[in-house]
Amino acid sequence: MVNRHHESQKLTYRVDLPGGQERLRELVLYVSLKSLQMERFGLIKLNKILWKADFAAFAARSVPVTGRAYQRLPLGPAPIEMAPLLAEMEQDGLIRFEFIHFGVAPDGQEIIEKRPIALVEPNLRWFSPDDMSFVDEAIDYYWGMTGMETSDDSHGVAWRSRNNFDPMPYESAFLSEEKIHHDQLTRILELARERGWRSH
């Protein structure tokens, strides 16, 4: 039996920030404009830039940039509402899509990039300079990667700990790929003994 000395805290799947969904819409425009000169930029990379910015911001200061809910998809994390939002933005004349052919993959499938093109300037009134620093860092981080390299990069322990279409809590930003050092493991085992934790 596990000895519980504290209440379990709820995980954070969404953070309601001023502007709501508008924050995501304006960042789609911003990232699309900033990425015009990228050799490879499609929906995979757009989703990963937004995810990296949001989760890095949450890890650093406990507040994400958009606050929108994310889910695990086969090609990596993405905002849950992204597909209907992009369709609405296209219908409203805010973005259009270019389909760029990049040859054939080893499995014989044609590689087609769906590149979002912003047709209007973003309105960044909801964002602080600190918010935008996380977005710009994510753009720079993924700049030279292909869509598949971007996807592979996002398949860390946070992604692997979920099933497809599962929501991804913001706290997963604290999960690490780094191995636990011997002294850290010793301390964890000491705490487990002190608190009466047992594995099953």
Image (cartoon, rainbow, N blue to C red):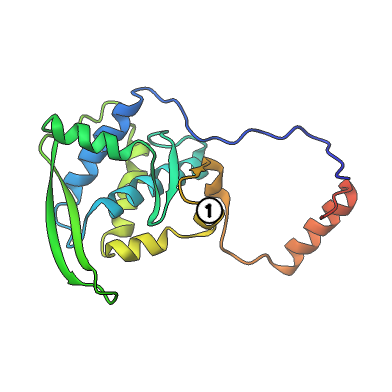
Give coordinates of residue 51: x percent, y percent: 39, 46
Q: Nearer the viewer, residue 102 or 118?
A: 102
Q: Quadrant of the C terminus?
A: bottom right
Give coordinates of residue 38: x percent, y percent: 18, 58
Query: Horizontally, is 162 left or right of 100 in the view?
Result: right
Q: Nearer the viewer, residue 100 or 8?
A: 100
Give coordinates of residue 107: x percent, y percent: 29, 74
Q: Nearer the viewer, residue 121 or 163?
A: 163
Give coordinates of residue 61: x percent, y percent: 50, 38
Instruction: Look at 67% across and 33% down and name the residue there.
Output: 9
Say what amino acid the circle numbered 1 marks.
Ala
Query: Horizontally, is 183 left or right of 91 in the view?
Result: right
Question: Is residue 117 visible to the viewer in this orientation of the structure?
Answer: yes
* Quadrant hosting residue 152: bottom left
Instruction: Look at 33% across and 28% down and name the residue there.
Output: 21
For disc 1, the marked residue is: 158
User: SS for tag 1?
Assistant: helix
Q: Looking at the image, is 66 positioned above or below residue 105?
A: above
Q: Residues within 10 Å of mark 1 (few under 14, many from 20)?
A: many
Residue farthest along the bottom direction in this orientation: 106
Badge count: 1
Residue farthest along the front direction in this orientation: 108
